[in-house]
Each structure stands twice: as structure tokens, then as C-alpha cells.
Image (cartoon, rainbow, N blue to C red):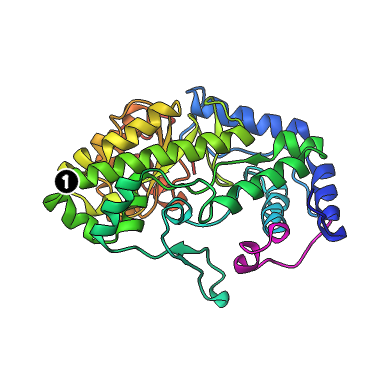
Amino acid sequence: MIQLSQQTLALLEDIEHRIDPESEEEMAAQWHDFLYDRFDGDIFLPQRKRISPAGVSLPGVNINDAIEDYEQMLIAQLQLVSGALNSPNQNLCVRANYGTGILSSLFGAEIFVMPREMNTLPTTRAIGDTDRIRELVEHGMPGLYSGFGRKVFEFSEICAEVFAKYPNIQRYVDVYHPDTQGPLDICELLWGCDMFIAMYEEPELVHAMMGLLTDTYTAFLKKWFEIFPKGSEMNVHWSALRHRGTILLRDDSAMNLSPELYKEFAAPYDGALLERFDGGAVHFCGRGDHYIDTLCALPKLYGINMSQPELNDMEKIWQNTVDRGVKMLMFPRGWAQKDLTRPGGYHHNLSI
């Protein structure tokens, strides 16, 4: 059992007593209505019945300190919960917050910690060697406790142990799955830009690596869900998003692919994970209109979270998401208001 400081214990007690079960149940019910087509408004934004200002305030935690110290990570995440309790629409949630390189670090990619003054999550450096990628494929699945894996699982066990002492926190603060990215993103994080060349020159190797990453993703999250079991009815991800299904995949690297390459090298593996985990949502940054039709045709894809609508043909995005019953989640408010007048609106399928 981790020995927590009196300051951390005071923060836990403050959060425990500020949580209003009725308000949290009502928030969850609003989200459930939205996700299951019982919301009849134009743009969904949940409203917490009762907000509660913080009674305990601790100094901010630099992310470099958090990734080196479990108590500092816990404090940083609890401070987000404390802030959400004083917000009309944020979810109460925490995660093992170790950046985008969690799964790539399992394969031996070098962890790169950002300069302290940036206060930004770490990542990993690409191996950048196709022969080394071939060796990884031949070796097979890495140990789940290598790289950042140990920190992720040990922190999750600490959360489970600590939260068990606080009934409201255990019930209403969601510990959502860490940033495991998605097969294509992990592949680029490991391989680097040579991955794109290999799609033309060594497609069999790319498929072999993508298959290995999909299996590793599966094993990693299955272990995570042994600590924090999740059903697929509704799950939290980030403070402003809930989704149907169990997982949220990232597809940022797909912006660099043609529609044909996305269909060959990404969609089968995204689809396999959505099937294995009984559905979920997909996030992407940048442009996605060129493959959105293939993405939204994947079975058990229930939601899209995207940034930078200005880089996309949004009418094409709308036709393949809200017009087809795929929820648009945590969409930028200003753009949502701008496109509200489109024919048909959002069919009650957009949240901000």
C-alpha cells in the first residue's frame, strides 16, 4: 500500500464529500440518452445538477514529476476531478497519464521526456530501422511490463487500492483506459516515416507488424480491464466525452494515407479491435475526410472525435457520421454552431 501524504489524503476526503451521487447519476443518464438516441436537441452538452467548489487546493504538478512519482501522478489526476466537480459539464475521471508512447515503449522504443519547462507528456523516439522492425516481428509480443507498461499497471493498482477506501470516488470517478493509441499510430511511432515507404516496398512486413501491434494492444488492454473491468454500454474518455463501446482508438497517422492505403493497412486492424472489445470510438487529428467513409463503415464504430474541422470537407464528414447515426463527440463549439444550419442539422448526434 502506498503511503500517501496528509495533503493527498485531504484532497481525497474533499473530493469524496463533494461528490453528489444524485448529480452524477443524472449526468450519466443524460449521456446515456444522447448515446442511445433519446436526445432530441440540436447539440448535446450535459448539465451537472449541482457543482461544488474545491475545499482543498494543492500546487500544480509538473508532468515530469508525475511520470516519476505515483503519488504526484495521483495528485495531478485528482486535481482534474476536483475541477470537474466545480464544472457544469465535465466527467469525473482519471487515467494512467504516460503519453502516446506507452505501447511503442514496450517494444524498446526510447522514451523521450520533454524539457521540464514545457510541462508536456513524454513520447518515444522512432527506431527508424526496417531491419530492426523485422526482428521485432520475428520476436513476437513483448512483455507487458516493459517500457511504460510497469508504470501504467502499478499506477492503476494504486488507484484501485486507494479508491476502494472512498465509496463515492470508487463509484463515480471513472478510471479510463490509458493512451494506447491505435495500431497505425503505434506502428509509425516505432518505425518512423520509413513505414510509409514500406507500405509500397514491403507490404507483407507492414501487415505482419500491424498484426503484432493489434495483438499487443489486445493483451495490454485485457490486462488493464482485469484491474478496472468495463462493460461496453457506455464509457468515459477525457473529461468531456463518453462513448458507446469499450475503447477509444487513435488514428492520427491515417491523415498521411491515401484512401486505398487506409483501407488496406489500417481499417482491418481498427475493425478487429472494435470487434474484440465490443465497439468504441475513434479519434483523429488533421484531415480525415478522405477515408471517413471506410472508417465509419466499420462494424461497432459508434463515435468519432476529431479536431481541426477547418482541414476537412465537413459536409463529407457529416454525411458519413451524424447522417449515418455515428455520434460526433467533443466537437469544437464554434464550428458546431456554424454548421448547425446545414440541411438536416446533426440529427441529434453531436456533442460539444
Residue at screen point 28% across, 49% down: 254
- Which of the pair 9/225 is nearer the observer? 225
Residue at screen point 33% across, 51% down: 136
Corner quadrant of residue 196: bottom left
**Span of residues in magenta:** 55-72
- Where residue 282 appears, x then y in whole percent? 39, 40
Instruction: Tell me the residue that label 1 is attached to.
Output: 203
Q: In this view, does 2 lie to the left or right of 305?
A: right
**Would you say residue 246 sits in the magenta stretch?**
no
- Which of the pair 212/93 is nearer the observer? 212
Corner quadrant of residue 18: top right
In the orientation shown, which residue stands out farthest toward the left? 201
- Where residue 20 appears, x then y in whole percent? 78, 37
- Let me know if residue 304 appears in the view: no
Q: Is residue 131 left or right of residue 10?
A: left
Q: Of the residues shown, which amino acid type is indicated by label 1?
A: Pro
